[in-house]
Amino acid sequence: MTNPTTPRPVRGLPPLHLAVALDGAGWHPAAWRAEGARPGELFTAGYWADLVTEAERGLLDLVTFEDALALQSVSLSGPDDRTDQVRGRLDAVLIASRVAPLTSRIGLVPTTNVTHTEPLHLAATLATLDRAALGRAGWRPQVSARADDAAHFGRPAPATLGEGDLASPETISGRLAPLFDDAAEVVAAVARLWDGHRTALPVTVLAHARIPYELAAKGGDVAYVTPYSPDGVAAVLTEVAAAATAVDRPAERPLKVFADLLVLLDERPGEAARHKDRLDELAGAPLRSDAEIFAGTPAELADLLLDWRAVDADGQRLDGFRLRPARLPHDLLAITRSLVPELQRRGAFRTTYEATTLHGHLGLPAPAGPRT
């Protein structure tokens, strides 16, 4: 790390927020076969502890943990029979709880299903995590339309999606509108329960279109969005602002907006793209994602982040980024040990933690009551 002083704002802007999304061996389906991967340890506490402590060494705002009620699948509608990709996850809240005592600053944000989970259970579980983490917990509520998720609870599938729907986030969110309505009610109910216990965790929402933007604006503090270009950044920021207006979000409580990118990073130009091609070959198909896929050097990624951050849509700008490492731990190490120092040299990222809670990292008001 560079000298621990407060960085100078870039182009008059405050320093970036940076988050990392952790999932299995990485976000590439063949990541478990990449050099340095640890597939035999994916279901051990030590593996996750190593990843999160590394993220904290990089001074990142937060890490998110992916989760689902059913196994991962290449199909939207249900399980597949792939045996050449990672299937299964540890419980995201329990991972966060396990690493909480091993860390002291970084925010811990698990994903939980809100379609089939009761608000009282969510409120108690997440409030317990927040106390274990001394105010560093957050939450990412997630809806589910999969039939195999519903089958765990003896319920019919709430919606049906086809492979062709992947090309249209608006189509997906439109078909899932009832689920997002239910999710908004669950988030509101959990918030009321937290108020009763003098607890309020930051709520983060992954959103691709108008309906999930409105969910984020109703009950969230951070929206993870998925533009693909500077023009896309401007369009998304405009849509998020419109969603906030539509749900009457108070102007004094602006929604933080982070852009998601799936990243492969190597120091030598062209090396990351070659590694991606090799993993694509092993997976049997090109890498697909709901987010922009970046393969390049840490310095090139720094250029992209700052270019996207410079986009101004009627006074709205991105607050930060959530990066999805394609290969773990390789791309996480590239983020913490190469990208972060590069951003620090440019005065665009913190050189020391200045807060001890996730609210503090994000510049959000502290909860009204004590956490003890």
Image (cartoon, rainbow, N blue to C red):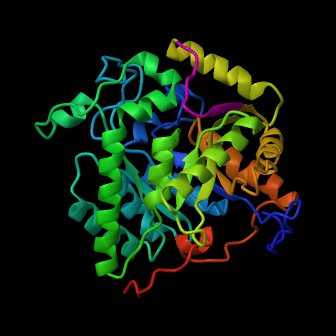
Between 121 and 250, the residue placed more toward the observer is: 250
Please name the predominant secondary structure of the magenta segment in the image: loop
Expressed as whole percent of the image width and height from the top left, the position of residue 367 reads 46, 80
Q: Is residue 361 left or right of residue 100?
A: right
In the depicted structure, whether residue 76 falls above or below residue 199: above
Quadrant of residue 264 in the image? top right
Between 152 and 141, the residue placed more toward the observer is: 141
Quadrant of residue 184 in the image? bottom left
In the depicted structure, whether residue 217 falls above or below residue 311: below
Is 291 magenta? The answer is yes
Expressed as whole percent of the image width and height from the top left, the position of residue 27 reads 53, 34
Residue at the extreme left: 154
Expressed as whole percent of the image width and height from the top left, the position of residue 352 reads 72, 71
Between 320 and 47, the residue placed more toward the observer is: 320
Does the image show residue 91? no
Q: Which residue sits at x=23%, y=52%?
A: 117
Q: Is residue 355 left or right of residue 211?
A: right
**Image quadrant in which the C terminus is located:** bottom left
Expressed as whole percent of the image width and height from the top left, the position of residue 186 reads 30, 57
Residue stretch in magenta: 285-294
**Image quadrant in which the N terminus is located:** bottom right
In the depicted structure, whether residue 276 falls above or below residue 37: above
How many numbered tags mark residues here? Answer: 0
Q: Which residue sits at x=79%, y=73%?
A: 4
Q: Which residue sits at x=41%, y=33%?
A: 174
Between 164 and 217, the residue placed more toward the observer is: 217
Does the image show residue 176? yes
